Amino acid sequence: MWVFGYQVMLDSFLKGLREFLLYYSYVALFYVILVTLLYYFIFGFSIRHIFSIKRGIQYNRINKLSSSSQLPPVSLLVPAYNEELTIIENVRSLLALNYAEYEVIVVNDGSQDRTLKCMLEEFKLELIHPVHSSSIKTGKIRGVYHNPEYPNLYLVDKENGGKADSLNAGINLSHYALISTIDADSLLEKDALTRIARVYMENPEETVAVGGNVRIVNSCTVEDGIVKDVQFPRKLLPALQHVEYTKAFLGGRIGWSAVNGLIIISGAFGVFQKEMVIAVGGYRGGYPGEDMNIVIKLHRHCLDNKIPYRVAFCPDAVCWTQAPDSYRILSSQRKRWGRGNLKNMIEEGIHMVLRPKYKVFGMLTLPYNIVFETLNPYFRLSGLLAILGYWMLNMTDWYTVIIFSLVNLFSCFALSLGALFIEETAFSRYPKLGDLNKMILYSLLMFAGYRQIGVWWRLNGHVQFLRNNNSWGTMVRTNFNK
């Protein structure tokens, strides 16, 4: 009798599981179709605007503009923690910019290596006692250094407080109305600041922030802080990140900028109105994703106060950055990104979602980010489990699964090819045919484990968030020419 009862319970369970999996298949199909359509929608805006960007690149006299007194002065903020291997090349690249009036403020965030000593020795900096603002509360400043031979270079030495605290300290010392954030492991092209300023000058009253384009410097030749010979990365992980960055910046951020829905300006290179950054309380500590956090706060501040504004993206203002070339460092970076994204959505973004008051940002950008970025790992994991369930319950066959997977692969690969089309059409930074072939190859290889591992990293980042882990994680720098 008990065997019969057990069989009835098992049959009932299997029936319920089949019904659940059937309904899940409808949800999954809707999810895949919706995310694909939104991807192509944003990509369409990128394509539409790339031709006007291309005309601007071709016909704007950047060199003439670089020496123009009409350019707004900018304070470049460089937070540095244990950056002895890259900081000198970074500062040299900044001091060599073709720009009329600017200053470079390096903030040593209590480094435990020779970052401070390298700066003092290389540029012969001496302790000064400047008058600086206290608009934003920061950690203790141990000293400010300067050398009249480098009139636009300052070095701030402070107790360790994190990247956000370092940026806030730089803001307090800065002299100009525009600030620009630059990572210490990055290099700006000589005309990058001019190009990004040109976008700001199109509408200076409403432009509260402009992001630059980040490219991978691995395998390139660097001399005196300048990228002399552009090469496609030779190692696997930087090469995969190269095509990933190309798709994200050229295929995505151009489009989001066009609809004023940009949610992030890379911490590697961006320009902001200082007054607006101070108005939202500066950069918030305890956020691994401080670059996303500041942009969300700017959107909210302007929309809450009905201030006309735009957050723009300048794809031809190029910043070259080091990409992690080992699994350990890359996984640490992506887990940090996952923590930062989740933390920002819970503590900042959720209050603005689907509220007409917040316009495109609240009605499209945030729902998109939550559903297709923050929750994406859970959909992917549940999708894998569902496929196993369909197979075990004879609800599908491998032929159907393979066809569905290939269609999904082709739609994603087409977006990568579209980003490469934008790259070759408007910028052509990699003129060698071999480099183009490599970019196409690695765009395919992205789907052979790299994206799947990325899901795992993001899930781990969410677990770290639940454990209240706000550490920066493992980051190891190397010399630019290695």
Image (spheres, rainbow, N blue to C red):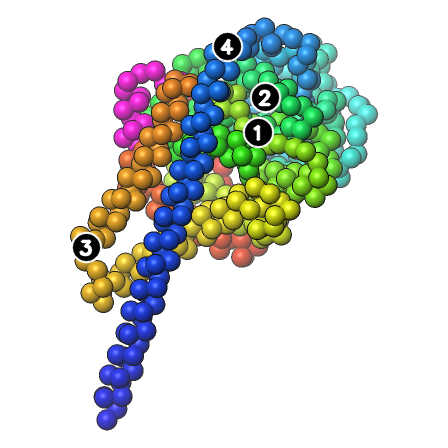
- Residue beneath disc 1: 312
Q: Main secondary structure of the magenta part?
A: helix
- 431 in magenta: yes
**Start-end of magenta stretch:** 429-442
Picture coordinates of residue 218, whole percent (x, y): 41, 25
Residue 198, image quadrant:
top right
Residue 279, image quadrant:
top right
- Residue beneath disc 3: 398
Task: Check if mark 1's residue and mark 4's residue have beta carbons within 8 Å.
Answer: no
Q: Amino acid at mark 3?
A: Trp
Picture coordinates of residue 272, whole percent (x, y): 65, 29
Mark 1 Cα shell of 10 Å, populated few (<14), some (14-19), many (≥20): many
Residue at left offset 33%, top offset 39%? 412
Residue 23, image quadrant:
bottom left
- Residue beneath disc 2: 199
Q: SS class of the residue under badge 3?
A: helix
- Residue beneath disc 4: 59
Task: Check if mark 3's residue and mark 1's residue have beta carbons within 8 Å.
Answer: no
| Mark-to-mark CA distance, 1 and 2 | 8 Å
Q: Amino acid at mark 2?
A: Val
Task: Check if mark 4's residue and mark 2's residue have beta carbons within 8 Å.
Answer: no
Query: Mark 3 or mark 4: which comes first in sequence?
Result: 4
Q: SS class of the residue under badge 4?
A: helix
Mark 2 Cα shell of 10 Å, populated few (<14), some (14-19), many (≥20): some
Residue at left offset 67%, top offset 26%? 179
Q: Amino acid at mark 4?
A: Tyr
* Quadrant that contains the N terminus: bottom left
Mark 3 or 4: in front is 4
Residue at left offset 62%, top offset 32%? 310
With 271 as the anchor, is 369 left or right in this view? left
Q: Amino acid at mark 1?
A: Ala
